Amino acid sequence: MGSLKLSVAVGDYDRTRALIDGDIRIDGVDGVFMTLPPEEIFFRAFRHAEFDICELSLSSFTLKTARGDCPYVGVPVFLSRAFRHTAIVIRTDRGIASPADLKGRRIGLPEYQLTACVWARAILADDHGVMPSDIVWVRGGLEEAGRPEKIAFVPPAGLRIEEAPEGMSLTAMLEAGLIDGIIAPRAPSSFARFTENIGWLFPDPTSAAKDYYQRTGIFPIMHVVGVRKELAVQHPWLPGAVLKAFGEAKAAALAKLTDTSATKVTLPFVEEQLRAARMLMGWDFWSYGIEGNRKTLEAFLRHHHAQGLSPRLLAIDELFHPATHETFKI
């Protein structure tokens, strides 16, 4: 009996490259790999369940799992993680001197359910007392007008969400002064162009993120990996094989990054940043699996429910296939 021929859709990261190139394989799987931007993967996965194995938005995955209509079962492979202090961009000419000044402001976001937005709102609530109901949310495409929520949901009472004017992107609204800021996983193009009067809410987001981690022990998770549910039922070994292979691919990427004989990333100070990350967060700072990420997952699920997204508070084990709850050791 041959290997299963399965479609695999993931981002093009150092931690997925060994799988994409075929240096590491998922046991029992002949993978047809597609490297796509996350927005495309998520839209196609949650709207049409197009892929057998794929990267998923943690927030949208949690929303559909809580509803009981998710076509995927999770594998605790966290392909994207980020401290989201950099996700909040503001008009610097509006008297916003601290996070508390966001109360009563109009803040754009591409989708209320985006994982980056969940984490940014969690930071604002836990550290600065700014609740989702304190802000007027303006929803629309970051660079292109007309972006819908990939999964429809009913906002809770007291939450104010407006739609961006027809034909206008959030970036255009920010530049025109029609909104006071944007929360998004990507910076608006006006920020990247160093447009006047547009900057970060946290002037030194790296210091803010380090302080957040030292206080909480949380390294925010953005994306997980999902396996089509019917495949996991037919082949219960598959989720565990996926976890194993993605873990090996990440280890290969970190081994290359640690080899400093020649810089692997087109960016200065990589060696120093890697050492600083390990001093702050430990050797395995980008861990997969449930146990090493329990605190982060519990915080996310709590905020996801409190922000009106998941209709009930999920337990961590409900997200992930039972075969991935633990792994063998030699």
Image: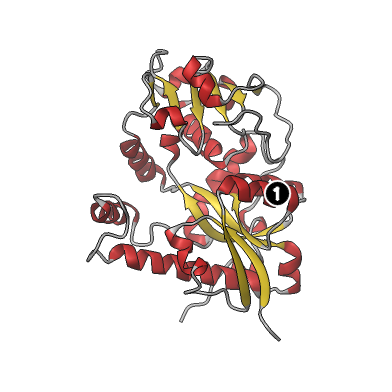
Residue to which mark 1 is pinned: 46
Residue appearing at x 52%, y 32% in the figure: 121
| Residue 203 in view (yes/no) | yes
Image coords of residue 192 (percent x, y): 39, 32
- Depicted 182 relative to depicted 276: above or below: above
Q: Quadrant for residue 252, please give it.
A: bottom left
Indicate left or right for 210 with 318 as reference.
left
**Side of 327 where 284 appears, left or right:** left
Q: Is residue 172 above or below residue 286?
A: above
Q: Is residue 131 visible?
A: no
> Crowding near pointer 1: few (<14 within 10 Å), some, many (20+)?
many
251 and 297: which is toward the camera: 251
Circle 1 — which element?
helix
Disc 1 marks which amino acid?
Phe
Image spot of residue 60 (x, y percent)? 65, 45
Q: Quadrant of residue 85?
A: top left
Which residue does the image show at 24% across and 63% down from the upper left? 262
- Picture coordinates of residue 247 (x, y %)? 48, 68
In the foreground, 208 or 314: 208
Q: Nearer the viewer, residue 80 or 45?
A: 45
What residue appears at the point 37 percent right and 29 percent down from the top-left corner? 202
State the image coordinates of residue 38 (x, y, percent, origin top left).
57, 48
